[in-house]
Structures are given as structure tokens and as C-alpha cells.
Image (cartoon, rainbow, N blue to C red):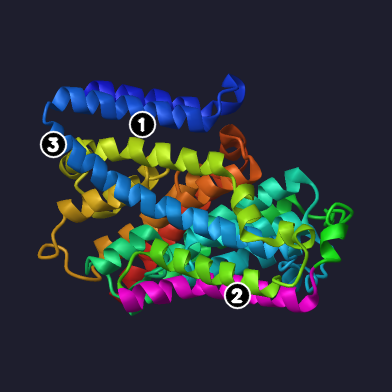
Amino acid sequence: MLTAIVIIFVIAYAAIALEHPLKVNKSASALIGAGLLWTIYALSTGDHHLVSEQLNESLMGTAQIVFFLMGAMTIVEVVDAHNGFDVITSRIKTTKLTTLLWLIGIVTFFLSSVLDNLTTTIVMISLIKKLLDKHDDRLFFAGIIVIAANAGGAWSPIGDVTTAMLWIGGQITTLAIMKGVFIASMINMIVPLAITSWFLKGKLVVSPTKIEEHGHRDKTTPFEQNLMFTMGLGILICVPIFKTVTHLPPFMGILFGLGILWLTGELLHSKKDDEDKEHLTLVRALKQIDMASIVFFIGILLAVATLEHTHILTNLAGWLNRVVGREDVIVTIIGMVSAIVDNVPLVAASMGMYSLQQYPTDSFLWEFMAYCAGTGGSILIIGSAAGVAAMGLEKIHFFWYVKRISGLALVGYFGGIAAYIIQFRLFH
């Protein structure tokens, strides 16, 4: 059974990676892979009650992420429909592509620590669509946004799912993780940024034409733009606060905020004709979001869940412990594996494998795990939630990312590792 599961997962993964040459949508490959994996697991196990419980558990985790993704994407669409991003784009006057790249990278890095890497990626890619006309330029920017968002999420307890897991589990504390991992995360972002800006040196910003949107622009006032932008961003920022105060999962906060934004929109445009307000409504925004990407997300998360329930990941962690032995090397490998397999089950397996008695709160293992698991996913486009979102939003091909961005992410990853180990040895 385990061999069959690994083989099918590898084939499904290869089909996702080869989406462009195969001319088969990655969502179809992910769904077929998930269906086959769960079918084999159910037929081989025989314990239908156990499999149903595990599937329900995986579905609950997947649904939370999907609802959150849908909510965040819809909020961004509503803000965009009201031309809310003009609040930022109208203030960016630079004509140099390299200057814009640094600005976007740094904003993404810090915004990701306050929001989370997934939401930040959605917001920032929506923003560069307003700033850049050339798709090739936007692809490079999207790659840097993925790296910067994952790096920014690694040093904040609310910036990444895995860091939040370690924080909630008691493996790390807020101030310690911020002090311990900030420099490493910053280097993880700066190195790829510096290399990319060298390649883009001398290029100018080509802004998109506004002809398409002109009709819509006449129908939104500056007040409406500012209000919807402020409310949209405010709701996204308040989600981590909502989670901290209520201890409810983030999807509940984003759906609650979506309801508030929906009500505000209805009241704001209540006196307009149906024709004038049709493109501004939240109903239209829901139709505009990329459902194919959301379906892909469901498939890949459910597929990875079988590796977790069959203990393949736990066995891999145990094997690494026996063969490698060294903590720093093991965690580095776990971070690189998270580029292939979702980092959430990898960190969950590691939390189960290493006890707090053996490795107390804020020890080297846990802080280093937060950095590696958080940033290792940038090495491949489907290694992180931010990457998967970017892949759908900008139609990034797997092998384009491997050729152009993976090397940069890898250099940044090892640069951050070196910085963290040096810093740890100096101050401990």
C-alpha cells in the first residue's frame, strides 16, 4: 500500500509540474491524485470508520484554508472593483523597475508578518497587476513576492501556518522567534532581491493602459475608493487579532469581515441603479475569483494528507534522525523537503517526533525549524500556500519558476541558514 501511495503521489506531482507540456490542467491532476490516494488507502486499510474520521479531519483542515483563501481573494476583488489600489499605485512614481522591485519586496516582507504569507501574496500580486503591463516583468515580481512573503511569515508567530503551529504548541514564544529569526529571514529575502534587481537593471516600468477600466473609474468616487481600500486592508489586518482574542480559526475572521464589507458595499451603493453598481457588488467579486486555483488547492492538500495519515512523513523523519543524526542538517533537509510536500504535515510530524522535554521552548531546533519550514517552500512554486496562490493568479508555469526563481530562493535559503547558525553561536 505504502509503495503504491508514494508512486501515485509522485506521478500526480509530476503531472502538476508538467501541466504546460501535457496540456492537462493542474487542478485535474491534483483531484485525480487525491481521489486515487484516498481510494487505495481506504481499500487497503479496511477500517472504514478510521479512514472516514481521518478524511473528515483532513477535510476540516483543508476547508479552513480554502474558506480563508476564498474570503481573502473576494475582499481583494472588491477593493480592486472600486479601484481601491489606486490609493497606493497613484503614490508610486518610480520609473525604474529595480526600485519598484525593492519597494514591493520590502513591503511584502513586513506585511506578511502582520497578515500572513497567503493573504499578502494575493494582495501584492493584485497590486503589481495595477503597476506593470508586461507579463514577463510581473512573473519575476511574483517570484520575489513568494520569497518575500514566506520569509516575512517565518519570523512572526502569526505570519505563517507552521510558525503559528509551533507558537500554539508552545515550542516557540513571540519575542524569541522575532529576535532569533528576523535577520535570517531578512537575508533570505535580500539575496534573491539583489540578484534579480541586477538582472533587471536599466529596465523601465511599463504601466498598464487604463482604457478598459475607464468606464468603471467614472463610477467610483475618491471616497468610495478610500473607504473600500481602508476597510478591505483593515479586515485582513484584523484577522490575526480576531484569532488571538477569540481563539477561533482565521477563516471565521475572514468570513466575518467579508460579511461586514458586503453590508458596507450594499449600503454605499443602495441609491445607485442596478446597472451602475453591478460591477461593484460582492456577488460579482465572488464570480471573478479564480476557482480553478481553489480546486487545485483542495486536491493537493487532500493528497498530502494521505502521506500524513499513513505515517510516511513520520517514518521519513525517524529515518533522517537515525541516518543523519545532526539537528541542523535534519532541519535543513526538512525545509528543502517542504518545497515538495506541504510544510504543515512536515512540521506536525516533527512536533510529534521531538518532545518539549528533550527540546525545550525556544531551543535551537524549534527556531531553526520555523525558519527552514517557513522559507524552504519558496524553492518550488507548489511548496507553499503563497506559491500556489501566485501560480493561479499569474498563471506561472512550474518549470519557468524552477529555471528563473528556484535558484534564487535556494541561495537565499542557505544564506539565511548561515546567518541563523552564526547568530545562534554568537549569542548562545
The mark that comes first in sequence, 2 or 3, is: 3
- The residue that appears at 36% across and 48% down in the rendered structure is 62
The mark that comes first in sequence, 1 or 2, is: 1
Q: Quadrant location of the C terminus?
A: bottom left
> Is residue 97 inside the magenta stretch?
no
Tell me where residue 424 appears, x and y as whole percent: 33, 69
Residue type pointed to by label 1: Ala
Please tell me how crowded label 2 is: few (under 14), some (14-19), or many (20+) other residues with Cα within 10 Å: some
Tell me where residue 162 appears, x and y as whole percent: 34, 58
Tell me where residue 418 appears, x and y as whole percent: 42, 59
Q: What residue would you read off at disc 1?
A: 34
Q: Relative to 91, say whether 350 is above or below.
A: above
User: In the image, 402: left or right of 295?
Assistant: right
Q: Quadrant location of the N terminus?
A: top left
Residue type pointed to by label 3: His
Residue type pointed to by label 2: Met
- The residue that appears at 37% across and 54% down in the rendered structure is 64
The mark that comes first in sequence, 3 or 1, is: 1
Kind of element beneath mark 2: helix
Q: Nearer the viewer, residue 231 or 344?
A: 231
Kind of element beneath mark 3: helix
Q: CA distance from mark 2 to mark 3?
A: 45 Å
Q: What residue would you read off at disc 2?
A: 231
Q: Which mark is residue 49?
A: 3
Q: Relative to 228, say whether 65 is above or below.
A: above
Residue range highlighted in magenta: 220-246
Q: CA distance from mark 3 to mark 1?
A: 19 Å
- The residue that appears at 34% across and 75% down in the rendered structure is 244
